[in-house]
Amino acid sequence: MVAVPAAPARRRRRGFDSAELIAAALAEQLALPLHRGLHRADGPRQVGRRRDDRLGAAPRVEPLGAAPAAVLVVDDVLTTGATLAACASALRRAGASQVDGGVFAHAFGARRRAA
């Protein structure tokens, strides 16, 4: 299990990463390992951007080493799927052959985009 990382500035401002908290609790309940294998660079915030802007300029997410073969990526809110897709791509580059996504909430009116 891997949490979608918050942008560093957002994490500093909040003092926590909601997706990481959700993933940690879920990993504990399911007795699965939590892999801290992704880094997200600071960049334009996804919140408040138009759908096509989000999809056209997804967050920069990089792997922090080798990924497990099968990964469940956990995010707090799904809107366009751009961030989830960026995480899935990074994990595949790091060696994951199966990447699935799970989200806590789905933004109203958002369309699903496969990761």
Image (spheres, rainbow, N blue to C red):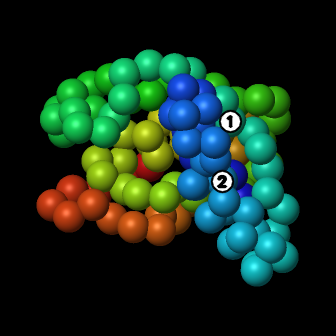
Q: Which residue is mark 2?
A: 20
- Residue 38: mark in rendering: 1
| Circle 1 residues within 10 Å: few <14, some 14–19, many ≥20 | many
Q: Amino acid at mark 2?
A: Glu
Q: Amino acid at mark 1?
A: Leu
Residue nearest the observer in this picture, 41 or 114:
41
Q: Is residue 25 above or below residue 14?
A: below
CA distance separating discs 2 and 1: 11 Å
Q: Is residue 113 visible?
A: no
Q: Based on the displayed image, in which of its 4 quarters is residue 21 positioned?
A: bottom right
Residue nearest the observer in this picture, 22 or 103:
22
Residue 49: x and y in percent read 22, 33
Helix, strand or loop at label 2? It is helix
Question: Is residue 39 toward the left or the right of residue 69 in the image?
Answer: left
Name the quarter where the N terminus is drawn.
bottom right
Residue 22: x and y in percent read 62, 64
Helix, strand or loop at label 1? It is strand
Residue 19: x and y in percent read 58, 54
Residue nearest the observer in this picture, 28 or 55:
28
Seen at 27% across and 60% down, the residue is 107
Q: Based on the displayed image, in which of its 4 quarters is residue 100 positioned?
A: bottom right
Give the number of the mark in front: 2 or 1: 2
Q: Is residue 18 above or below residue 27?
A: above
Q: Is residue 21 above or below residue 43?
A: below
Seen at 16% across and 35% down, the residue is 50
Residue reaching furthest to the bottom: 29
Question: Is residue 8 toward the left or the right of residue 33 in the image?
Answer: left
Q: Earlier in the sequence, mark 2 or mark 1?
A: 2
